[in-house]
Image (cartoon, rainbow, N blue to C red):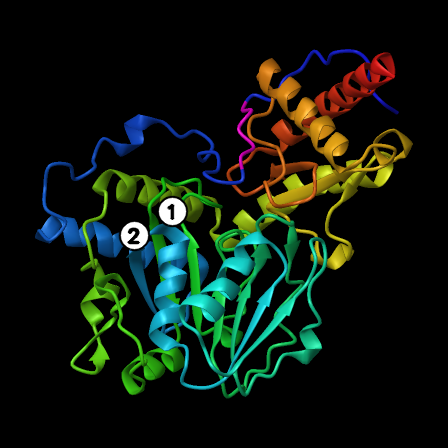
Amino acid sequence: MTNTTKPATRPANPNFSSGPCTKRPGWSLAGLSGALLGRSHRSKEGKARLKLAIDKTKTVLGVPEGFVCAIMPGSDTGAFEAAMWAMLGARGVDVLAWESFGAIWVTDAVKQLKLEDLRVFEGEFGRLPDLAKVDFSRDVVLTANGTTAGVKLANYDWVPADREGLVLVDATSAAFAQPIDWGKVDALTFSWQKVMGGEAAHGMLILSPRAIARLESYVPPRALPKLFRMTKGGKLDRGIFEGETINTPSMLAVEDYIDALLWAESIGGQPELARRADRNAKVLFDWIERTPWIDNLAVDRATWSNTGVCMRFTGPTVSALDAEGQAAFAKKIVAMLDKEGVAYDIGSYRDAPAGLRIWCGSTVETSDVEALIPWLEWAFAEACSELAKAA
């Protein structure tokens, strides 16, 4: 049923952006009043706050003993590129991509690192590539959750625990909201502004003992910028993984991230964060399954993301439009909801098929997703009405 009447109830929080994502429930600037501003991040107090952010990250995510964690410059991009540039090339590499950001790592591997022994497996928007073709005697590069396609890994069962190569995982839209099988991961990265709703510019890099061994035994045949250097004298620079950041971080952003981690810890850590995202996404999943004019962009139900849910319009009204018309139709709906102040930043990514992308991560309240549904139906009906009048 399509709602033709403007709904009476609005989401209390209209922020459904897929990054930066909405702040945690109850967030206010008052929570940052203790930020170490005007002080050096190299001071005793500064390093203590940075180490706290690292330690709380490891606690909330359940990072095993022997793994290390660092705050990196350049958000998730900087963290993941540091891992790629510092570790790849020791053996053959398989790179997997099924959306825009995964394609960036392909570009890095092919055009920037120019890896000689390289295989690329790409899936179209909505589908994973053939995971059975991956060779784990090689290093493997992948994205846990496709931010722009809404396609996630169903699990890590397909990754052998006794692999020879390393597995590098970009988890910026998966960390905290989706389980991480730490026995199947060697380098994992994410950014503060995603699932935890922190502020931008900083990323996290978590390394397994196997990844540490690679850093200490392999000298890549390329110049490494300072921001990518994680060893000193052939050994891991442990200071970086204890809060001695490579460059100057924003201590205000650090405090905001700590605030989010303390909230996460208070509600039950990663398991509860995942449950919150699952509840939010289920509201949309149930709606998709009962609505004939909307589909999940992800084809396989097991790969439907519980964070950035990507959707495309279907049915005769939209199917009759060409690609340009479909894009205009989607933008019209996004603009209507933005103007009404009920949903901000929910358009699909610029490289993705035309449609909607609604963030359902852990900092979103389920009641807001529920309140959004009637507005989506209203906006669709309005857009269809305008099409009919123009015909």
Task: Tell me, yes or no, if residue 371 can be seen here.
Answer: no
Which element type, helix, strand or loop, lies under badge 1? helix
Q: Is residue 111 above or below residue 270?
A: below
| Res 229 quadrant in image | bottom left
Badge 2, how many Cα within 10 Å: few under 14, some, many 20+? many
Which element type, helix, strand or loop, lies under badge 2? helix
Residue, disc 1: 261
| Res 87 quadrant in image | bottom left
Say if mark 2 contacts mark 1, CB within 8 Å.
yes
* Residue 246 located left or right of residue 363: left
Residue at 23 percent of width and 43 percent of height: 250
The range drawn in magenta is 13-17
* Residue 240 located left or right of residue 129: left
Q: Is residue 74 above or below residue 143?
A: above
Residue at 74 percent of width and 20 percent of height: 379
Q: Which mark is residue 39?
A: none
Q: Quadrant of the C terminus?
A: top right
* Residue 3 located left or right of residue 187: right
Please state which amino acid type lies under the numbered disc 2. Answer: Ala
Q: Position of residue 163 (x, y in %)?
A: 54, 86
Task: Tell me, yes or no, if residue 347 can be seen here.
Answer: yes
Nearest the camera: 377 or 317? 317
Residue, disc 2: 53
Residue at 54 percent of width and 24 percent of height: 13
Please state which amino acid type lies under the numbered disc 1. Answer: Leu
Q: Position of residue 339 (x, y in %)?
A: 59, 15
Q: Is residue 215 above or below residue 191?
A: below
Q: Earlier in the sequence, mark 2 or mark 1?
A: 2
* Residue 316 located left or right of residue 260: right
Badge 1, how many Cα within 10 Å: few under 14, some, many 20+? many
